[in-house]
Amino acid sequence: MCLILQNRLKRIPEKNVQERRQSERVRQVFLPACMTIGDRNYVVVIRDLSESGIGIRCTIAAKPGQKVSIQWGSNDPLEGEVGWLSEDRMGVITECSPIAHSDGSPPRASRFEVSLPVKVYHRDTSVEAELVNLSTKGMSIAHPGQLGFGELVTVCLGAQSFEQCTIRWSRDGASGLLLKEALRLDEIRHILELAQGSWRWHEQTAFSQAS
């Protein structure tokens, strides 16, 4: 049955896909999300959800029929494939309803998985730590020692500093931090590229100085 569905989806022309979506229930949204293609993650923005697919704004060099996975908010990743591309827009066809997949989930900023070395400054000391994931409003780090709820720390990634981050939770050598200032999507995109080897440290330095 899956093979039949995959073959049917690949034969749907872009025009037919868009016409079908116009006749469906479409929910207009603005949701930052993480799209996975192969072994790479990308920052995208979901602009609409329908019963059969997702409309995305992005600048990814994908191809129709390419398999993707999209995760947003507190939802599990949703599998699909690229249905059409038009400039900075992409339509992803899914095997189950993205609206049903999204309904009932508590609102939460999308988390982007990374693994980067950082330095954490706490009171009069500093420790080497790992940036595990981040969102527009916060980040999670793995670190030695203890950090207390409500305490303030500064996290340095290369030449970029995140000052006065508030500890929201801390247990078993991991802590969740609330950022003083929300991250822009382009900042998250650059950090994600850095984590995946697309950047070198001197490029990270140049970006932080330009921000």
Image: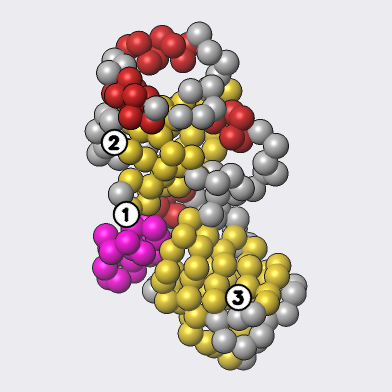
Coordinates of residue 143 in the picture (x, y in percent): 55, 81
Residue sticking out furthest to the front: 1
In percent of the image, x 25 and y 39: which residue is there? 61
150 is higher (above) or lower (below) than 55 = below
Q: Is residue 76 left or right of residue 205?
A: right
* Closer to viewer: mark 1 or mark 3: 1
Stretch of the chain drawn in magenta: 190-208
Residue 17 image-quadrant placement: top left
Q: Is residue 104 visible?
A: yes
Q: Quadrant of the N terminus?
A: top left
Coordinates of residue 209 in the picture (x, y in percent): 38, 64
The 10 Å Cα crowd at callout 1, few under 14, some 14 to 19, many 20 or more, is: few
The dot on residue 66 is 2
- Which circle's residue, 1 or 3, is located before the other in the chain? 1
66 is higher (above) or lower (below) than 19 = below
Most common secondary structure along the magenta stretch: helix
Q: Identify residue type, mark 1.
A: Asp
Residue holding disc 1: 39
The dot on residue 174 is 3
For label 3, the SS is strand
Residue 103 part of the magenta-drawn span: no
Q: Identify residue type, mark 2.
A: Gln
32 is higher (above) or lower (below) than 178 = above
In percent of the image, x 61 and y 81: which residue is there? 173
Colour mapping used in the image: secondary structure
Gap in angstroms between the C-alphas marked 3 and 2: 36 Å
Label 1 with label 2: CB-CB less than 8 Å:
no
In percent of the image, x 57 and y 15: which residue is there? 25
Gap in angstroms between the C-alphas marked 1 and 2: 13 Å
